[in-house]
Amino acid sequence: MTTQTQQTENTDTSQHTDPESGPRKIYTMYADPGHAWLKVRRAELVRLGILEQISRYSYQHGPFVFLEEDCDAARFVIAKSQRGEGYMITEECEPRADRFVRRCARFSRID
């Protein structure tokens, strides 16, 4: 079996292609000792129709939204699954310090 990973649109998301399951986007979950956030593009939240449902517990920086793990990331995963869109999530953990995400602006529905 051959698999292929290809970078797309920056270093934020990769595309993984598996001959059996097809293409899947790869997202990164950033974690620190207290919490975790899933990095996605704001445009994807708009496309999925869930931008208005994202809470103030998520953060934003440039074109990216860092979805808090408890509700917003789950909402995103459900929306992707309901559309039949494949995805993979990788995790980057910082066990001794707060993540850079905590220094980003709180999420706002207005760009």
Image: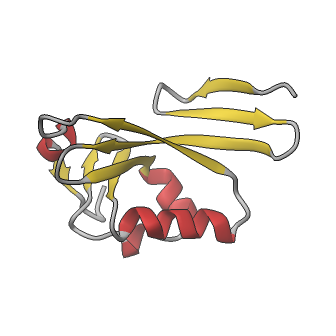
Q: Quadrant location of the N terminus?
A: top right
Task: Name the residue rendered at 31%, 40% in the picture.
Answer: 62
Q: Quadrant location of the C terminus?
A: bottom left
Where, by quadrant of the figure, is residue 31 drawn?
Answer: top left
Q: How far from the left and from the top, in percent, is residue 79?
A: 58, 69
Of residues 96 and 110, the one drawn nearer to the viewer in this rendering: 96
Of residues 47 and 54, the one drawn nearer to the viewer in this rendering: 54
Q: How does the figure colour the protein chain or chains?
A: secondary structure
The total of numbered circles placed on residues is 0
Horizontal relation, residue 9 to residue 42: left or right: right
Task: Name the residue rendered at 54%, 30% in the picture.
Answer: 9
Horizontal relation, residue 96 to residue 36: left or right: left
Task: Name the residue rendered at 49%, 26% in the picture.
Answer: 10
Horizontal relation, residue 79 to residue 64: left or right: right
Q: Is residue 16 above or below residue 59?
A: above
Of residues 8 and 21, the one drawn nearer to the viewer in this rendering: 21
Q: How far from the left and from the top, in percent, is residue 57?
A: 21, 64
Q: How far from the left and from the top, in percent, is residue 45?
A: 48, 60
Horizontal relation, residue 100 to residue 52: left or right: left
Q: Is residue 35 above or below residue 7?
A: below
Q: Residue furthest bottom?
A: 53
Task: Name the residue rendered at 66%, 24% in the picture.
Answer: 6
